[in-house]
Image (cartoon, rainbow, N blue to C red):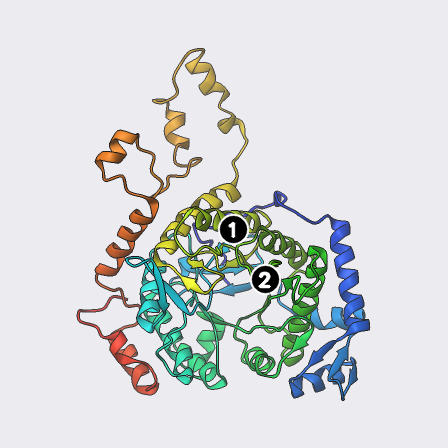
Amino acid sequence: MSKKMNKSTHKKGDRPWPYQPLTPGEIQKIHQTTMKVLEEVGFEVRQPEAFEMFKKAGATVDHESRKVRVKESLVKKLISSIPSQVTLYGRDSKHDLYLGSGNVYFTTGGTALNVLDYETQKRRPANLQDLIEVIRIVDQMENIHGMLLPTYPNELAGEAVDINRFFAGLNFTSKHVMGGIYTQEGINEVIQMAEKVAGSPEALRERPIISMITCGISPLRLDSKYGSFMIDLARKSIPTAVPVEPLSGATAPASLAGTLVVQNCDGLINIMLSQLANPGAPVIYGSVATSVDFRDVSYLGGSVESGMLNAAIAQLARHYGFPYYSTAGISDSKSLDTQCGYESAISNLMVALAGGDFIHDAAGLMEFALTVSKEKLVIDDEILGMVYRTVKGFEVNEDTLAFETIKNVGPGGNFIADRHTRKYMYKDHYFPQLSNRENREDWTQHGSKTTAELAHEKVKEILSSEPVFYMDQKLADGLMKSFPKIKKENFVREKKSKK
């Protein structure tokens, strides 16, 4: 497979990741406690075939309680077949994402039920057109590398959601398309559609332009529905993220170390099942770990502890050699205010500096992950550009140390017009698109616009332009005929499409 890197990603090489909340000894303690829980406490398996697969593999099982206990030797055997790298392909190869390769990628996430209406500053139920608009915005964001379908089209019947969401993704972006799935029929339809878009079933497996998400249930449980989805996707060799969501203080211990143990147990349970179903299946160890507000035990998405947990889990994933689907960037704010910015920035920065492979939820999500803001997508793209600049670091060599330049300019001199400045002004410095760096007089003359106002202008600019279609007309028409659940009126083309 090609190893051409996305120009917006940054490889750390031999440098250690600068934020490592766990020491090597602490990682080992978490691993040892995880193994002890899996062997002595066990986990509940409600999916019948999964229960039998664990039994056949040598686990200790209790048919009445549906409890399974696994020794460390069996855990190591079962997880040994997971690929250490998984590549998620874009329709355009410049958007290929190499998970497990030492790079950091950011994507959207969800699935949120609502959107924030900028004009009214109130939320409303999301619909399919909102999802299409989100996809069109993300397609033009440089620092959002993949399209994780982040909203739920509330007006559609449940059996039509999967095919419409993925059809929208494949229609309006050339980036990789990932999404949660809701029905077995939806899985089958989406894969059949993607095979047609890719050219054949073999072409889709060679360059998977879609991937899916199955959600584990914390603590220590494999449910029937998502267990079935996981088995099926593993056997179909579709890249699958298997995140779990322990809530520190609710579905996991209040101590962050204890939450990491539950997260790791649940993550390994899902990994083991995928490999029992199909050794070598392309699966991605996942985390949506966060905390609760202890005043009312409600879910939090933007807590600093969420960033700490997901950064620590990046270390655990590297310990096992797993590609990692991480979480950061959610804000619990209900408006595009200061809280919305700092919560998203802090967690994105923490997890990126810890080396999270594939950081989802990184853009657009607010209000406990219930709501997507189109303007926040644009603002977060700018935040992520700054985060990437931080991850990249800077080179220290003879040329960058600039001794000869300093010598030539001399005491009291000026470096503005020097050739060295022209060489490094773009290489070493990030140029934001939204952040205002004018003096007050110029800023006032230009309308005294806030960041949210500038982001709204960008959203209007993108959505008022002619849509770019990444399927040709013949293919799109054929798919809509083959899959009549696709809501055709949302995909009308008034002008000639572009590939």
Q: Residue reaching furthest top?
A: 411
Q: Which residue is mark 1?
A: 348
Q: Is residue 460 left or right of residue 2?
A: left
State the residue at coordinates (29%, 77%): 476
CA–CA distance in space, label 2 to label 1: 26 Å
Q: Pointers 2 and 1 in contact (CB under 8 A)? A: no
Observer-nearest of 12 and 71: 71
Q: Percent x, y for residue 179?
A: 46, 71
Q: Percent x, y for residue 343?
A: 50, 50
| Label 1 residue SS | helix
Q: Residue reaching furthest left?
A: 495
Count of numbered marks:
2
Q: Is residue 296 left or right of residue 455?
A: right
Residue 270 has which mark? Answer: none
Q: Quadrant of residue 144?
A: bottom left
Can see residue 130? yes
Q: Quadrant of residue 159?
A: bottom left
State the residue at coordinates (55%, 80%): 229
* Disc 2 residue type (three-letter): Asp
Q: Which residue is mark 2?
A: 296
